[in-house]
Image: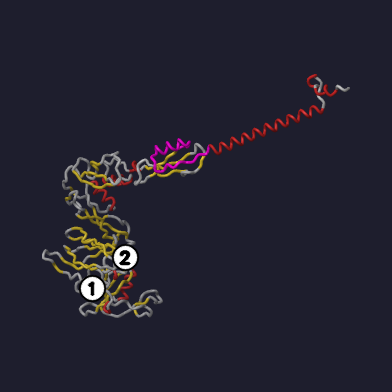
Amino acid sequence: MGDSGPRDSLGAMSGRPPTRDARHRTGSVRVVFLALALIGLAGGGAWQAGAYLVDREVRVPEVVGLTYEAASARLLDAGLTVRSHPERDPQARPNQVLTQAPPAGQSVRPGRIVALGVNAASEARRVPELVGMREADAVARADAVGVSVGQVVYVHAELPAGAVVRQEPAAGTALEAGGQLVLSVSRGSVDAPFALPDLRGRTVEEAEAALATLGVRHVERIAAAVSFDRPGTVTDQRPAAGAEVRAATPITLVYAVEGTTVVRVPDLAGLPLWRAQLALRAARLELGAVHRVDDASLPEGVVEAVPSGYTLAGSPVAIVLNGGGETLDLAGGDGLLWPGDPGWPSLPDVTAGAPDPVTAVGPPDVPRDPPPDVPDPGTSRVADDGSRIIPFRFDPAAVGIASLVREPYRLRLVVADAEGERVEFDVALAAGEGLAVPVRVVGDEPLLQTYINDLFFQAWRP
């Protein structure tokens, strides 16, 4: 019985089953060993993960300003991936890196994509192929890719008139900043005269395109008619259809403007003030400044209206009124303007010292004193060559357009008479500044047109 302990401890070796105490001790040892192994694995994994997170993060280097090749090499050495997209900066070097994302200094994982914006200005200034194109299309194409056309030379060539014959520099050339393109455009095999086609009834754009195919280089538009159904169509041309012209001959296209925006100034001659007001209202115009005169040699009522002919709807019309001291009122129960109604302020009277509101050519026998800032252009007279010299006067304070008194503006006068169409003057004027000049016209029915800031203002026949 005293040898039972050793036998129990060696039971496994002797083939006998171990006792319960021996099995407990063996299981405890196994549990401790397994726990230690798991702790070791967890600690090693945590150390490796921490080392990976710390050691494998990289900082994005600064590459803006480098060439794309140098920037790519630097990013690849840092373990990053490179992608690029074109950007344009005419002031930067070709192929220079303009932007990068992520920015320099940011910590990222290896292999992270860094997007580079690379200057493609050199490609934008590469000269395109323009030979054979129409001049206008070639200029538009060059402008679209950042190439400036500095000079156009017209030469005789076999290509149709208006087509580009040569370009300098040649297509594919990289044009340096500030460089310009020179185009040689065909004027036809010879500059022989040709019959001008009938352009009436076509739109202005269609007429200009037809003239361009013939090599005509100078075309001017003039708005001098009104149309309710076909605005923008050519109503007249100068020279007339069938006339022999050359490519260098200036061609004038007279076209119709939208009838809903341009109206005819009604005939106000002899009307009293209140009836003139109603006539203007019916024509969708406003009464502008009123200049009163007292001349027994003239009939009573309106003796002059400015502008005359056609003008924009809603524009004020200044009048010269002879005799009568009537005033108008807006408070009438019928909504119309009638003389004698109370509440209407007195209209300005230049005889009391106010500026003269009449702004353009008028009958030479109408007495009027010019405003202080606009000299008297004189009176109508016949020149030695049979032409007429007529006075033109424009006073911005009298036409009812407030911006002309507050801001600088441009004034252009176009004359169409027996000698053709011409710009008599196109001048820049200071705010409130007027102009008075004598104008020479030839023929019985000259047409004068004024434009303010390139917008049609008035057309009339003196």
Q: Position of residue 171 (x, y in %)?
A: 28, 39
Q: Secondary structure at mark 1?
A: loop
Work out whether 45 lies above or below 299.
above
**Residue hosting label 2:** 407
Q: Is 157 in the magenta? A: no
* Residue under the point 20% across and 55% down: 238
Figure coloring: secondary structure
Across and down, in percent, residue 128 comes to 30, 41
The residue under label 1 is: 370
Q: Which of these two is toward me, 81 or 194?
A: 81
Give residue 221's quadrant in the image.
bottom left
Q: Nearer the viewer, mark 1 or mark 2?
A: 2
Looking at the picture, which amino acid does disc 2 mark?
A: Glu
Q: What is the magenta range?
A: 56-81
How far apart in space, not on screen, are marks 1 and 2 (Cα)? 22 Å
* Image quadrant occupied by the N terminus: top right
Q: Residues within 10 Å of mark 1 (few under 14, many from 20)?
A: some
Q: Is residue 283 visible?
A: no
Q: Secondary structure at mark 2?
A: loop
